[in-house]
Amino acid sequence: MLKRPQCHRFSHNPPLDRLIALVASDSRGEIITKPFQLEGSLLTVNIEARGGEFCAEVLGLEGVPIDGFTHDESIQYTGVNELRLQPRWKQFSNLKTLQGRIVQLKFYLRKAKLYT
């Protein structure tokens, strides 16, 4: 008599909005977006850096950091785990002054995951 094969169901439920990520290890990683026209005034990122660091920089079309939005002026986030973190800079809490400009975003990560 033939035995009927047994089927086992495996289910994985990743956390909300956390299916695909760019991951940085112990050494710092950098991610630069393609140029785009900035339409909104808020930047929101999905970041997990519980034991690491994250910050954001805004570049102009030429790839040069924009004054007020440089790496040195960026707030450094450590130990964060946020689905909707809004990066800030020392003088700016949003991107309103850059609306309509062509920009690139540069993210700095160490021991962190930046989710799509």
Image (cartoon, rainbow, N blue to C red):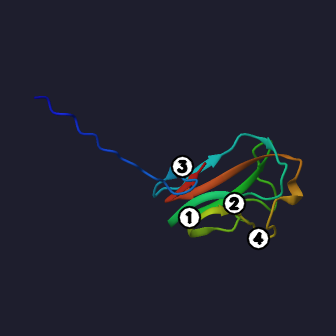
Name which residue lies at 53% across and 63% down.
Answer: 49
| Residue identifier under label 1 | 53
Question: How many angstroms separate mark 2 from mark 3 (CA)?
Answer: 22 Å
Image quadrant containing the N terminus:
top left
Q: Residue furthest top?
A: 1
Q: Is residue 90 left or right of residue 45?
A: right
- At label 3, the amino acid type is Ala
Give the vertical position of 65 relative to 7 (above or below): below
- At label 1, the amino acid type is Glu
Name which residue lies at 58% across and 52% down.
Answer: 115
Name which residue lies at 80% across and 63% down.
Answer: 94
Asked which secondary structure carries label 3, the reply is strand
| Residue identifier under label 2 | 71
Label 1 vs 2, first from the N-terminus: 1
Q: Is residue 110 left or right of residue 100?
A: left
Q: Are marks 4 and 3 in contact (CB under 8 Å)?
A: no
Q: Residue furthest front?
A: 1
Asked which secondary structure carries label 4, the reply is loop
Near mark 2 (Cα within 10 A), the count class, few <14, some 14-19 or many ≥20, is: many
Question: How many angstroms separate mark 1 from mark 2 (CA)?
Answer: 13 Å
| Residue identifier under label 3 | 21
| Quarter where residue 45 is shown | bottom right
Question: How many angstroms separate mark 4 from mark 3 (CA)?
Answer: 27 Å
| Residue identifier under label 4 | 90
